[in-house]
């Protein structure tokens, strides 16, 4: 009887030790895995460093390789009005709604598409490997962590072309004016016409000195390339040198 009770006690102690070991192992694994990021009211994810590292190492390479050709600011043709190169763009979505709803895989069209759902099948040519599907699904489930976007990045496409603003800033659209010719104090400056004075004033403001006059052979080459895009012929060089000496 005593032997049987002793054996039962040893067995119970072993079971308790095994349960404690498994509990510690589970706790260690949970601590090591990236914790889900809680979506903020604005639709972005408040992510910890581990979650951001998961995005950069696992998620972004998939998006670049599988999605950016048709769904980014560099796409030749933006398909479905959808961009996936920023969190703001992904949560805004395209023609049929948000592609990513942080923390909600059922409402995220991206997850449905990569699983070849009824509405979309993406990428259209072939399914992603199961491992990549799992990564993107896990990312959305985590709250779609994404590093802070640079200032000025928006969910829309490229910045709208503002013709009026461009015309107001570009020199060729400025009204004709008659500015005063700058007064150059440097007596060594060879000011031969008002244009030289404007150029010299800009050089002085930038702390630069004018380059020395070009030699005649160098000058004729510069003129020829500027005017016709070709080097001067030997005859043209000789003619220019004679004219230069007589001037």
Image (cartoon, rainbow, N blue to C red):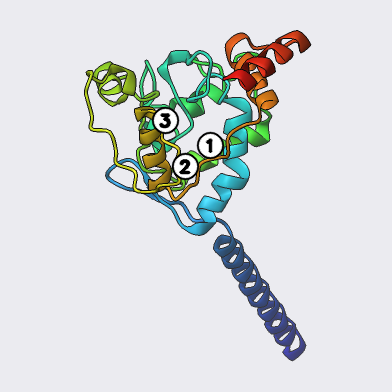
Single out the mark in the foreground, 3 or 1. 3
Q: Residue furthest bottom?
A: 2
Disc 2 from disc 1: Cα separation: 6 Å
Q: Is residue 121 left or right of residue 8?
A: left
Mark 3 and 1 residues: CB-CB less than 8 Å, in contact?
no
Answer whether residue 220 is visible to the viewer in this image.
yes
- Quadrant where the C terminus lies? top right
Q: Do the numbered discs 2 and 1 sit on residues whose CB atoms are within 8 Å? A: yes
The residue at which mark 1 appears reads as 137
Work out whether mark 2 precedes mark 3 in sequence or the reverse, and give the earlier one.
2
| 125, above or below 56, in the image | above
Give the residue at x 33% y 18%: 172
Where residue 24 appears, x then y in whole percent?
61, 71
Q: Work out whether residue 143 or residue 190 is closer to the camera in this orientation and state it.
A: 190
Residue, disc 3: 192
**Which quarter shows the N terminus?**
bottom right
- Evaluate whether residue 119 shows in this view: no
What distance separates the C-alpha of mark 2 from that of mark 3?
73 Å
Q: Which mark is residue 141?
A: 2
> From the viewer's perspective, is residue 51 above or below residue 30?
above
> Hey, which residue is sitting farthest front in the picture?
246
């Amino acid at each position: 009887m005593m032997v049987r009770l002793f054996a039962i006690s040893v067995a119970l102690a072993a079971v308790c030790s095994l349960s404690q070991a498994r509990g510690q192992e589970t706790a260690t694994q949970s601590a090591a895995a990236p914790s889900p990021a809680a979506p903020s009211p604005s639709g972005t994810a408040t992510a910890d460093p581990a979650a951001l590292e998961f995005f950069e190492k696992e998620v972004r390479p998939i998006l670049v390789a599988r999605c950016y050709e048709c769904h980014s600011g560099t796409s030749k043709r933006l398909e479905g009005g959808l961009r996936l190169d920023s969190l703001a763009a992904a949560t805004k979505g395209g023609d049929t709604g948000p592609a990513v709803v942080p923390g909600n895989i059922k409402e995220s069209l991206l997850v449905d598409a990569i699983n070849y759902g009824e509405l979309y099948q993406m990428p259209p040519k072939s399914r992603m490997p199961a491992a990549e599907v799992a990564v993107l699904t896990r990312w959305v489930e985590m709250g779609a962590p994404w590093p802070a976007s640079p200032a000025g990045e928006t969910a829309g496409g490229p910045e709208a072309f503002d013709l009026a603003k461009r015309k107001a800033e570009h020199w060729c659209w400025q009204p004709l004016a008659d500015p005063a010719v700058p007064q150059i104090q440097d007596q060594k400056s060879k000011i031969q016409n008002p244009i030289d004075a404007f150029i010299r004033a800009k050089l002085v403001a930038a702390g630069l000195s004018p380059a020395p006059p070009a030699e005649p052979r160098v000058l004729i080459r510069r003129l020829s390339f500027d005017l016709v895009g070709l080097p001067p012929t030997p005859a043209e060089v000789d003619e220019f040198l004679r004219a230069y000496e007589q001037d």
